[in-house]
Image: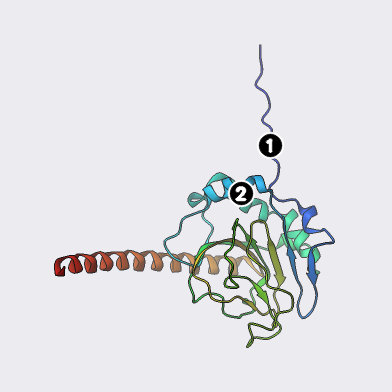
Amino acid sequence: MSTAAPEIAPMPLMDERKLLREDNLLRSEPFAFMVAQGQLPASSANALARDFPHYAGAGFFPWDPAECGPELNRLVEELASPRIANAIGARLGLADLGKSPSLVTICRSLNKRHGTIHTDSKSKIVTALLYLNEQWPDTDGGCLRFLRRIDDIDDMVVPQVRPLFGTLAAFRRSDNSFHGHLPYEGERRVIQIAWLTSEEEKQRKTRRGRLSRLFKKLFGRLDRRLGAGRDRNAAHRD
């Protein structure tokens, strides 16, 4: 009697050893942050692009597995795993970051309102951004900047981070963890994970994100209807 061959588990998309490499950019002043390139296998790019969610509006939305394909969901689960969290925490001077609640949000596109300088809320311990753009235009817009001041987008601690496929940027939230980017409008695919101070904060932020998404959906439908009406009126005038 023949037996079925055991299923072979796929190779992990993320390897915590890559986060611990000595050639990754690491700073402790004026706040703790890191930039690590090449965190994803190039062979995964097509599948992750295929499985990336399509959102009606711009901005970050809470991760919903039903909106994503299997490879993207696998990546999110790995990114939120204790092994990756603890590797990031170790680089930023934090032990056992993987024990903290995490919140994953996903962004497909930005508008020009995004990117203003901020520090992140006090409910966040660490924020990490994993970029999934295979190419980036010849522009400074949309490129992450770690900053010394809240009032100068050009006072960078290190050169700006281009949001290219497999680049991970993470920082430890503090009262001076200033960051932002120049305005950019268009597609900019990124997964953001924040490790939070409590489960209550995770639930609060999730509810707020879902409500924001609902409003954007409703306003998007209204805009499309109004646009269609304007087009019909223009056609009649012509």
- The three-letter amino acid code for the residue at tag 1 is Ala
According to the image, label 1 marks what residue? Answer: 9
- The three-letter amino acid code for the residue at tag 2 is Ala
According to the image, label 2 marks what residue? Answer: 45
Q: CA distance from mark 1 to mark 2?
A: 19 Å
Task: Answer above or below: position of 4 versus 121.
Answer: above
Number of the front mark, 1 or 2: 2
Residue 94 can be seen in this image = no
Q: Give percent across and percent down for residue 22.
A: 85, 61
- x 28%, y 67%: residue: 227
Q: Earlier in the sequence, mark 1 or mark 2?
A: 1
Local secondary structure at mark 2: helix
Task: Answer above or below: position of 14 versus 177.
Answer: above
Q: Give percent across and percent down for residue 53.
A: 49, 54
**What label sits on residue 25 in the rendered view?**
none
Q: Is residue 175 left or right of residue 216?
A: right
Viewport quadrant of the N terminus: top right
Residue 36 position by quadrant: bottom right
- x 81%, y 58%: residue: 20
Q: Is residue 115 left or right of residue 57?
A: right
How many badges with numbers are in the image? 2
Residue 206 can be seen in this image = yes
Residue 213 position by quadrant: bottom left
Q: Is residue 232 left or right of residue 156?
A: left
Could you tell me if the residues under marks 1 and 2 are in contact, i.e. CB atoms within 8 Å? Answer: no
